[in-house]
Structure formats: structure tokens, C-alpha cells
Image: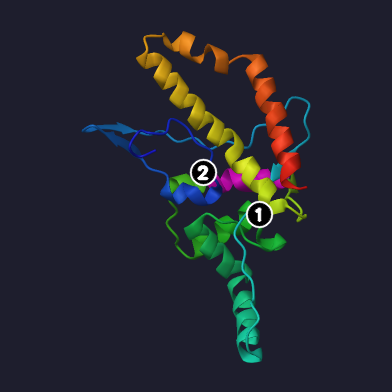
């Protein structure tokens, strides 16, 4: 994003801290104006939002180390301490009582935390999302890791390959409309959608 290679992206709340303020490309600098919006909803769809994040685990070790790890996790997830961490990182607190904008703002103010403006905007929207949506997280199932790879890379890989073909057609003298016509039709979408569904089903066999 910072060098102008990406025109748009979808990021998590934790990416707000790292989102650039300007694009520097070929000696030119352009300011980036940032807006933060809730997830889009399908027409007539219900208010659901996907919840996902990093996790912490206690691995098998000595009794003393396992006990110390649990004590640390309890300490780390105490409401005020966890909110402090969230203000710096863009993560949301893990406890329900801490997951509201009033608690967040109170702790941030009391501890004089100077929030990045993008993080502040992101957290406002994130807490509205928590309040106004039913949260969904994918359940564990056999083949889940393989299915996730399909979801993550299927369309991405196709876009990379199609772009190469479009670039080749442009070099051969075709206009942009001519070069992209076969990739922007409903028929091409249906073809991809069928292959995507098949790949997803095959991944969990």
C-alpha cells in the first residue's frame, strides 16, 4: 500500500497501527485518506460478523511452568491490562465486560494512552460491530486446514494467472476491454464458482 502497488485491501483491526499515511512511488508522495467502515451486508442478510484473532495456549511442560503460564494468562487478560494492550495493538479484549467502548475509552483516558487516529477510528467501528452483530467464528472440523487454504488462495491464484493472460493480450495489441472481456462475464464467474465449490468439497474428503 505504501508504494502504490495495492489499490485497496481488507484488513483486520490489528492492521490499523501499520496502515500508511501516504504513498511514496517514483519520487512522488500522495496522502492517503482513511475511512473505517463496518463489514458490508448482503441484501436481506442478517447481521453477522466474523470474529477471528490470535490465540494463546499452554503447552505440556513441567507442573511449575504450566502453573506459571496459567497465572500469566490470568494476569494478562485482566480487564484494564488487556484494554491497555488492545489500545497499543488493535486487538479486542477477551473478556465480555471489557468489550464495550465505554470501558475502552475510560482505561485509555486514565492511562494517558495516545491512540493512533486510525486505531481510534477502527476501535469505534469494531465495538459498534460487537454491539450490533451476532459474532461468528468457524468451528473446527476434519480437513479444516485444507479448506482454509482453498478459501484463502483459490481466487487469489486465479487472479494472478488471469492477470498474466491480460498483460500478455495487452502486449499483443488488444485494448483493455478486449483483454479483460472473457474474465468479467457472468459465465466466467459461474465457471469459477463451480470449480471453487468442487475444490472446497474435495479439500475435506
Residue 37 picture quarter = top right
Image location (x, y in percent) of residue 73: 62, 75
Taking the magenta stretch, the answer to whether it contains residue 53 is: no
> Which residue: 66% across, 90% down?
63
> Which residue: 56% across, 14% down?
182
Where 174 sits versus 42, above or below?
Answer: above
- Magenta region: 122-132
Residue holding disc 1:
100
Asked whether residue 132 appears in the rendered view, the answer is no
Q: CA distance from mark 2 to mark 1?
A: 14 Å
Image location (x, y in percent) of residue 116: 43, 50
Give the dominant element type of the magenta stretch: helix, strand or loop.
helix
Asked whether residue 45 appears in the rendered view, the answer is yes
Pointer 2 or 1: first along the chain? 1
Residue holding disc 2:
121
Taking the magenta stretch, the answer to whether it contains residue 124 is: yes
Answer few, some or many: residues within 10 Å of disc 1's Cα (few below 14, many 20 plus, some between 14 and 19): some
> Which residue: 48% across, 8% down?
178
Residue 61 picture quarter = bottom right
Answer few, some or many: residues within 10 Å of disc 2's Cα (few below 14, many 20 plus, some between 14 and 19): some
Q: Is residue 15 left or right of residue 45?
A: left
Q: Secondary structure at mark 1?
A: loop
> Which residue: 42% across, 49% down?
18
Amino acid at each position: 500500500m505504501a508504494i502504490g502497488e495495492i489499490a485497496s485491501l481488507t484488513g483486520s483491526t490489528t492492521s490499523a497501527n501499520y496502515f500508511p499515511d501516504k504513498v511514496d512511488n517514483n519520487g512522488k508522495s500522495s496522502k492517503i485518506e482513511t475511512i473505517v467502515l463496518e463489514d458490508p451486508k448482503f441484501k436481506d442478510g442478517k447481521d453477522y460478523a466474523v470474529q477471528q484473532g490470535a490465540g494463546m495456549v499452554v503447552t505440556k511442560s513441567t507442573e511449575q511452568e504450566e502453573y506459571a503460564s496459567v497465572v500469566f494468562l490470568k494476569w494478562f487478560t485482566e480487564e484494564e491490562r488487556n484494554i491497555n494492550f488492545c489500545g497499543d495493538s488493535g486487538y479486542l479484549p477477551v473478556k465480555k465486560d471489557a468489550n464495550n467502548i465505554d470501558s475502552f475509552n475510560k482505561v485509555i483516558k486514565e492511562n494517558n494512552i495516545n491512540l493512533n487516529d486510525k486505531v481510534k477510528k477502527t476501535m469505534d467501528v469494531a465495538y459498534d460491530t460487537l454491539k450490533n452483530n451476532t459474532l461468528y467464528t468457524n468451528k473446527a472440523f476434519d480437513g479444516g486446514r485444507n479448506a482454509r487454504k482453498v478459501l484463502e488462495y483459490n481466487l487469489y491464484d486465479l487472479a494472478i494467472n488471469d492477470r498474466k493472460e491480460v498483460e500478455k493480450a495487452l502486449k499483443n495489441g488488444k485494448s483493455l476491454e478486449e483483454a479483460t472481456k472473457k474474465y468479467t462475464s457472468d459465465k466466467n464467474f459461474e465457471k469459477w464458482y463451480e470449480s471453487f465449490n468442487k475444490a472446497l468439497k474435495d479439500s475435506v474428503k
